[in-house]
Image (cartoon, rainbow, N blue to C red):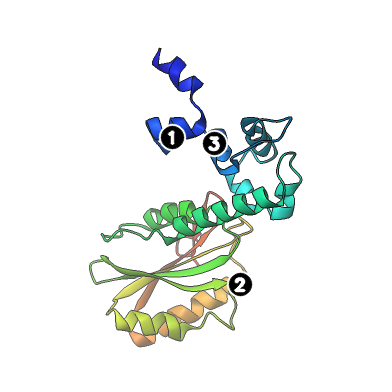
Amino acid sequence: MLALKQQSLTPREQLLATGAASLTDQQLLAILLRTGTKKLPVMAVAAQVLQRYPQLAALAQASVTDLEQIVGIGQTKALELKAALELGDRIRQAVQLRFGTVTSSQQIGQFMVQRFAGSQQEHLIAIYLDTKNQIIKEKELFRGTLNAAIAHPREIFAYGLQVAAARFILVHNHPSGHTEPSAYDLKFTQRIQECGALIGIDCLDHLIIGHQQYVSLKELGQM
């Protein structure tokens, strides 16, 4: 009887009754879309969105123009949906590592794979540690296109000195999803290691985050 009642509820009613976590992707989309068309109910429009983008990460990367190609979605709905997806992406990226002890690069890598899923921008993050590998602070240093013009060691080490870090781990993502380190990645890492040796704040590892995977330059023998 309870199952029958839940099936008869609209997505909004079910959210109120059982919470957002109980809703399907289709139902959540229907709430964001609000209304359908004269020929298609909102749940049918939501189904078309998921048919076009069965992976939510792909939906998050869809442009407003892409979304407008779906029957039942005009510019207003496309803009609202894109704004909601972008907000969700920013919330996910804002989540920081909890304070605690870093025991392996895998611990950091798996966390960051989830954080940067679907991200279209490149981010450079430093995780600063004390002498016992306890996390002192995580800081986003750069966002955009990682290159020599904006990724300068002085910003990395200036903050490390400010928080009295003993060592740190660098993390950056490749929006392409590929984890193979570029020539610049390797050169940049070598430069950071050299600076760290002089200043006395060691770079323990540099992780490159891709689509559902990561690589450790230390494990690759590049550090």
- Tell me: residue 10, above or below residue 84: above
Q: What distance separates the C-alpha of mark 3 from that of mark 2? A: 32 Å
- For the view shown, which residue lies furthest in the left direction? 132
Labelled disc at residue 15: 1
Q: Amino acid at mark 1?
A: Leu
Mark 2 sits on what residue?
Answer: 145
Q: Residues within 10 Å of mark 3 (few under 14, many from 20)?
A: some
Give the left or right position of residue 132, taking residue 23 as reference: left
- For the view shown, which residue lies furthest in the front direction? 38
- Tell me if I can see residue 158 in this picture: yes
Mark 3 sits on what residue?
Answer: 25
User: SS class of the residue under badge 1?
Assistant: helix
- Given residues 212 and 191, the one toward you in this image is 212
Q: Position of residue 137 (x, y in %)?
A: 32, 70
**Which quadrant: the N terminus?**
top left
Q: Amino acid at mark 3?
A: Asp
Q: Position of residue 198 (x, y in %)?
A: 37, 87
Q: Amino acid at mark 2?
A: Thr
